[in-house]
Structures are given as C-alpha cells and as structure tokens.
Amino acid sequence: IRVAITRSEVEGESALSIAVPTVPLVDGDLYRARRSILERDFPVLNQRIVQGQQADIAHQLHLMTQENRERHEAEAARKAAAKEVSLESKVGGTKVIMMMRLCNATTEDQLPSEWVNIIKAPKKNQLDELQFAINDWKEDTQDPDIEFPARTSLLETIRLVNLHMADTNAIDTGLSPFTLSQPKGRVDRDHLSTYSALYGGGSAPSTADANALHRAVAIAPTAHHEAISMIRRLQIMCRLFGENNQDPYNQLGAFCSKYRSMEGQLDQIEMDQAKELLPTMIVRYVTLQCSRY
C-alpha cells in the first residue's frame, strides 16, 4: 500500500489515481464455444439435458406405477375369480336346471339370490343363510311371528332341490309340510350343535349323529292350528321360487286364510272317532298338490 500511494515523481500522481482500463466486450462466438466445452465436459451444467432427464425420470416413474397398479388389479381379479364358485360345481348342472324351471328363470342370473347365497356359502354357514332367508320371508305373511327354525334336513332338501315326494306315501320326502312341524326345542338345539361340530371344525360327531342331521322326520298334526302352521311354513318356503313364480306362495296363503276362517265350522262337523284325522288329511292333500306342482 505504501508503495502504491508513493509518488514516483515530484508533482506526479500516485498509482492509485491511474484510471482502470476499459474491459473488452465479450466475444459472442468465444462465449458460446466456451459454454459448449463446459456443457460437454460437465453435462450437469446443461439445463436442457437436466430438464429432459427429469422428464424421462417422471415418465418412467409413471409407467412403473401404472404397471404395478395393473399387476395388483390383475392379481386381485384372479383371486376373486378363484374364490367365485359356480352353482354347477356345487350342486351339478341338473339341479341348477331344475331350479331354473321351478323359478321360471331363463338364466342363472335370474335365480333367487337367497338360494344362490345358500348354495355358495361355506358349508358351516349354509344353515345360518337359510335361517336368515326364512326370517325375511315370513315377515311378508299373515303370521310374521310364527316359529320356524331352519333344520339340516330342510337345508338338504333346498340345497339339492329335492322338492318332490319320492312317492305318494313318502310324506317325509320332498318339501313336505309334515316335516315342517313345530320347533322341537332340545332336539333342534342338539342338531344345531352337531351340525356346528361337523362343519365348523369342532369335535367330530359319530356317523349316526351325522346321518340323523339329514334325515327328515314327518309328524302328523293333531289339531287344526298345527296344520295351519305347517301349511304356513310351506308357504314361506315357496318364496324360494323367487319373484317370477309366486303362484304357489299366493295360493297357499289364500288356502291358509280360508282354512283359518273355517276352523270353527270344521270342529263342529268332526266325528269323535276322527277328530285327529281331519287335520292330517288336509295337510296330506296340500302335500300331494304341491308335489305335483
């Protein structure tokens, strides 16, 4: 600093007072050449390349995300298809065709959802599905409070579409009101426990217990109110045929109403020796008519 501010001559100027030389103008060609060399040696300095790389990365990330989503959707569809069980694989094509005829259905999609849910449900849940359906169906009758437990014998009848009597004397076969008797309390509870043990993964019941589950027991009514209840339960089960075939349901409902209105007159004309026979005869008549249908 001392040298810089010291004058070299008397009356002369110091070095600090010398004017700064003018900066030469930038040569455009030289600048572009220099920039090209820098971008070639250091690509990160090339903004066009950086922006292009960012766009490529974003595009590749989008493609990868879309591919993963499509793969997951395809896997979910495959698992759903594997879980979807066809009716034919459950009960056979013949049973499905029989049910379609009874329901006046032209395709499987027109079959009643209640029956489809029962068939496709796991074995351990089928009895519950039947009970849920019965509880819904009976709400539309004139006896919504009627007791109607779902039994395993009834489940087998519905599941296998064995709705017709084997012969005119086999009142314990098919969808017969003789098998739709009053709840039997302890017997029903024992059957339910055996069913849960058999299909719910509990202790294995004996072969005799398993056979008893699917064997229907026919009980003859001894009074008119018992006969009416049996026919009413048969009417409820006719809801199984769906909306396209309401004739059995409507006809049985009308028959129950007429039967109940004539109950007092029937009691008066009965003979003492046949007092318990008339309700059975009426229920048998209804059974034969329904089986022919």
Image: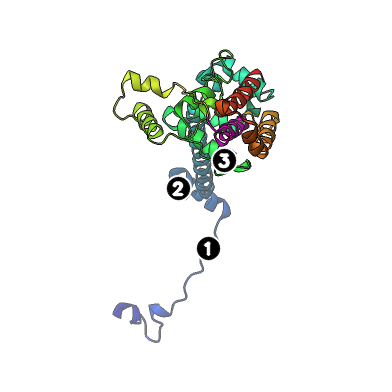
Report which residue position mark 2 lands on: 44
Instruction: From the top left corner, tell me how far across and down residue 267 is, in percent.
Output: 62, 35
Q: Earlier in the sequence, mark 2 or mark 1?
A: 1
Does residue 174 sit above or below 149 in this rendering? above
151 vs 241, nearest the viewer: 151
Q: In this rendering, which labeled residue sits more in front, label 2 or label 3? A: 3
How crowded pointer 2 is (Cα within 10 Å; few <14, some 14-19, many 20+) is rated as few
**Which residues fall within the magenta stretch?**
222-240
Quadrant of residue 215 in the image? top left
How crowded pointer 3 is (Cα within 10 Å; few <14, some 14-19, many 20+) is rated as few
Instruction: From the top left corner, tell me how far across and down residue 66 is, in percent.
Output: 52, 38
Does residue 42 sit above or below 116 in this rendering? below
Between the residue at mark 2 and the residue at mark 1, the CA separation in whole angstroms equals 29 Å
SS for callout 1: loop
Q: Quadrant of the C terminus?
A: top right
268 vs 63, nearest the viewer: 268
Report which residue position mark 3 lands on: 136
Report which residue position mark 1 lands on: 24
* Residue farthest along the top direction in this orientation: 167
Q: Amino acid at mark 1?
A: Pro
Q: Amino acid at mark 2?
A: Val
Q: Main secondary structure of the magenta part?
A: helix
Instruction: From the top left corner, tell me how far across and down residue 189 is, in percent.
Output: 38, 35
SS for callout 3: helix
Q: In this rendering, which labeled residue sits more in front, label 3 or label 1? A: 3
Q: Amino acid at mark 3?
A: Asp
Does residue 233 sit above or below 13 in this rendering? above
Q: Earlier in the sequence, mark 2 or mark 3?
A: 2
Q: Quadrant of the N terminus?
A: bottom left
